[in-house]
Image (cartoon, rainbow, N blue to C red):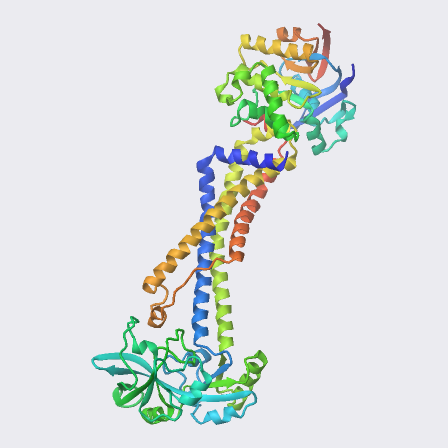
Amino acid sequence: MTTIVEATSLKKTYMLGKIPVEALRGVNLKIESDDFLAILGPSGSGKSTLLNLIGALDKPTGGKLSIEGIDLSSLNDNQLADIRRRIGFVFQFFNLIPRFTARANVELAMSIADVSRAERRKQAEELLETVGLKGRMGHKPAELSGGEQQRVAIARALANNPRFLLMDEPTGNIDSKTANEIMHLVKRLNEEKGVTIIMVTHDQQLARETKRTVQMFDGVIAKEIVN
Amino acid sequence: MKTRDVFAYSFSAIKLRKLRAGLTTLGVVIGIAAIVALLSITQGLQIAITRQLQTGFATDTLIVSTGGGFGGAFGQGALGGATSSGFTLVVNDTEIINNITDVDTSTAIIQRTGQIKSGTIVQDVTIVGVDFAEYQNIYSSTFVPENGGSIPSNPENDRVVIGSRINDPQENGTSLFTVNSTVDIIWLNATGFPIVRNETYIGNVTAILPEIGGFGVGGPSDYSIYIPISQAQSFFGTDECNVIVVKLTDDEEATIDSVSAATKETFKNQVSVTSAVAVLNTLSSVFSIIQLFLAGIAAISLLVAGIGIMNIMIVSLMERTREIGILKALGTKSRTVLLIFLNESAIIGLIGAVIGIATGWGLANVVALAFRGGGLFMGNQAVASAGMTITPVLTATVLLGALGFGVGVSVIFALYPAWRASKLKPVEALRYE
């Protein structure tokens, strides 16, 4: 087991107009490979901020954050973009490109990483098959249900063999039955394929399905539970 | 992202909003079409006019006149009379000119507008008095008889040489005259009192000139009737000549310049000296200015199109903020986002330029056809009936320039929106509704 993410007294302060808002006030967190971590917490507790920092979408204002031993604060925008290619994102609102088919959406992630056309197509089809969308590859997001769209998003997140998946309320926008199916898929990815998963949620029940849960409150980690 | 993928991505974005992209492209099309149409038609016009002039020109000649260079030189009317200071050129001034270094020979021309009558047909013509021998010496390729006539060196007073269009005014192959036909020459004397008095004499056709075309700058013209200079002197009652045509020993620019200067000096700057080469050069520079001016006007419409592109790109940027966020979350570099947006604009510019060039070229040809039909630009009988046709010319420079300009303007106006798109922060872009 290797350490993938390590946060030490991680701080993030936003300026909301002229008022500084301390979203993270010193988070210490260590995530190892094969982990399945849930970050729980009420709105405004800083969990999404933490996820954005781990995903290299945003820069911390204090403390230290390293991914696979690389200190993110030392990186410029281009280098951060490179880091992002090795991270799989799954968003609450899917964030698929509407004009692209399911397959093209998955391929896009690989085209950004300069994967060849033939290889892209082959991998995209395999990934969509893994998430159970073999017969829906040619459909655009508008022709897919919420659950199916999230499966496409998961397939896209897995496209470049990411070091870990970051999921921001992945079941927040779909019905509970489909949410269970998605959770089942995610668990399977973690258990069978060894994909490290970090998932933000405010759903206690979902959190129990993971290996480990951290509870955030007011910009710090209040509690850690190993399930 | 590979170049090909950037292109495919940009293209998919354009395809999504066909109407919008189409209208934006239309702006470019109009601008480019205007530039191409105006430039190819003026270039065609320039070539046509230059060719016309060259036919009537001998490059080793100078034209000395008392009027403002062009008026005298073109010599269609009876310009080139006395200057304000009362200076006139007379027929014998050729002797002075012949003494100037590098002058081969020179000949005086007296001309008036008049009419000729043959049977019931009356034509307005230019009556030109020349020394047949000298004139033929200078314009040896154009002042020559056609179909059996001859141009005598020492003609009798009633001998006349007529231009081809006087012989065949309808330009349909019929001939009004043959050698030895007689022709009534009428001069409308409007210079003295009483104001109009017709003077007439009967000429005898000794030669008919071949068709020359052109405006006959000093040289033979299709619309003139040539009479011996001595006859012109007595007929018009004057020794004053309109122009003196000077033949040089060669057509080197140095020779032209030195003889021009010497001639002006000889006549104490009372004359103007026009060289065929100078007329062509002046014409060419006039056309350059016209082209620049027209292209400038057309370019303005392209700038308007550019602003349209900028507007559309900014709207597109706002609509696609989230998409940019997704691209960045997936690891797209800012530079690639910039390229995607510039590419979209470049594609629009390229399509617009290609369609615009085709449209402009088509338009130029339509205008040229209309011109051929009815003398659209110049109602001038001389131009229209000289059978001058304009063939629009699309040079490689104009073609590539239009292409480059269309794409260039599109890309330049997309720079700001594309830059803004590339600078979006991923977190904020993803949160954008």
> Horizontal and vertical percent for residue B264?
52, 86
* Residue A210 shows in this picture: yes
**Residue in the image at 46% along x and 80% along y:** B69
With B229 as the anchor, is A106 left or right in this view? right
> Horizontal and vertical percent for residue B303?
50, 50
Residue A60 quadrant: top right
Find the residue positioned furthest to the front: B148
> Horizontal and vertical percent for residue A1?
78, 14
> Horizontal and vertical percent for residue B76?
37, 79
Which quarter of the figure is the C terminus of chain B placed in?
top right
Q: Is residue B385 above or below residue A50?
A: below
* Residue A46 shows in this picture: no
**Residue in the image at 64% along x and 33% along y:** B1
**Residue in the image at 68% along x and 23% along y:** A87
Count of numbered labels shown in the rendering:
0
> Closer to the camera, B146 or B336?
B146
Residue A112 quadrant: top right
Q: Is residue B421 above or below residue B251?
A: above
> Closer to the camera, B110 or B68?
B110
